[in-house]
Image (cartoon, helix red, strand yellow):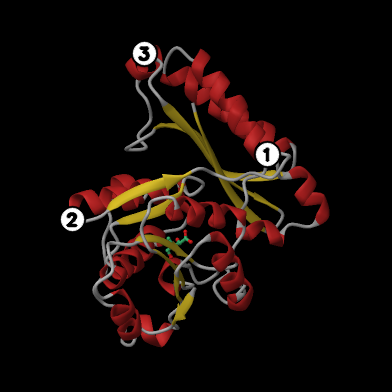
């Protein structure tokens, strides 16, 4: 595996290569990321992964400064997972001047759920992803379903801008007790780590209640009860809700009655750590 830090060097390394399979990351890799790289490696294309902690997607009070930068370890893991090229630009390389051209994702998709609690987050994500797509020019880009809304927003962006690439989603990797792997799990204390799988369990319980809900009022009651049950365990939920899978709008009575495929999504704080997860049903 080659590690490359500049756009010019990456372009010359990719010149004449067949379209690549691309896995963008912010580093501090875990098995969830590596599963995406392994998935990319099955596509019969050169695999490019990027590591870049993107300032544009962090709010001022969020963990941009303390987000772990673990490049040497990440590079070893990527090599073992079948990555061919690691692109790891520094900020000066990706943002040599203030990034004043930005992608403005539609509020209906990007200002709800994560976007409601992290204003500007998806604008920052879409801007860096669009820029990385322009640099890497992949044929396929792989995103984790764990960041469900992010995957849906980026897939919609690629479709609307007619980007010449396919966005594919990789499965969430979970610890044996059900906790979705996330870089932020490292912030949990031992007690919190013991409690953390309750979020995935709450989503599954909510999905079961949603399947029994005859109309949106019953669904809202099930969502409120699920959030209350988490609060009683010491969590502070931002949202715990059931949505349609593609546009993330609330299902109407017809969708509930028809048993349309849905997704339960949650974000909740446990102590100082904010976790997100989802469950398709
Ligand atoms: O999911 C992430 O790690 C980031 O949001 C991404 C897609 C690499 C953009 O910075």
- Please name the residue that numbered disc 2 is placed on: 161
Disc 1 within 8 angstroms of ligand 1 (CB) = no
Q: Secondary structure at mark 2?
A: loop
Left or right: residue 141 compared with residue 218: left
Secondary structure type for disc 3: helix
Do tag 2 and tag 1 residues touch (Cβ < 8 Å)? no
Comparing marks 3 and 1, which lies closer to the viewer?
1
Left or right: where 223 falls relative to 270: left
Where residue 178 is drawn, which disc sits there?
1
Residue wearing tag 3? 258
Residue 126 spot, x, y in % from top left:
33, 61
**Left or right: 238 with respect to 12?**
right
Mark 3 residue CB less than 8 A from any atom of ligand 1: no
Q: Residue 245, relative to residue 4: is it above or below?
A: above
Select label 3 or label 2 by which is in front.
Answer: 2
Q: Quadrant of residue 135?
A: bottom left
N-term-proximal mark, 3 vs 2: 2
Residue lying farthest to the right in this orientation: 191
């Amino acid at each position: 595996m080659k590690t490359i830090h500049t756009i010019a060097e990456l372009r010359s390394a990719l010149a004449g290569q067949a379209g690549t399979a691309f896995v963008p990351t912010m580093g501090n890799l875990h098995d969830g990321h590596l599963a995406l790289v392994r998935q990319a490696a099955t596509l019969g294309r050169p695999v490019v992964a990027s590591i870049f902690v993107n300032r544009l997607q962090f709010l001022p009070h969020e963990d941009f400064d303390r987000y772990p930068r673990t490049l040497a370890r990440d590079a070893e893991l990527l090599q073992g997972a079948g990555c061919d090229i690691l692109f790891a630009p520094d900020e000066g390389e990706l943002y040599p001047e203030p990034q004043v051209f930005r992608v403005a994702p539609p509020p209906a998709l990007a200002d709800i759920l994560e976007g409601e609690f992290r204003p500007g987050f998806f604008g920052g994500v879409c801007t860096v992803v669009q820029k990385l797509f322009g640099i890497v020019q992949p044929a396929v880009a792989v995103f984790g379903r764990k960041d469900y809304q992010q995957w849906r927003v980026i897939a919609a962006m690629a479709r609307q801008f007619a980007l010449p690439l396919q966005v594919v989603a990789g499965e969430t990797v979970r610890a044996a007790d059900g906790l979705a792997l996330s870089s932020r799990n490292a912030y949990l204390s031992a007690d919190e780590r013991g409690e953390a799988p309750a979020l995935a369990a709450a989503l599954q319980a909510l999905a079961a209640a949603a399947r029994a809900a005859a109309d949106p009022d019953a669904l809202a009651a099930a969502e409120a009860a699920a959030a209350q049950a988490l609060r009683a365990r010491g969590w502070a939920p931002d949202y715990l809700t059931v949505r349609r899978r593609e546009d993330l709008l609330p299902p109407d009575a017809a969708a509930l009655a028809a048993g349309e495929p849905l997704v339960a999504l949650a974000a909740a704080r446990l102590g100082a750590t904010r976790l997100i997860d989802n469950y398709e049903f």
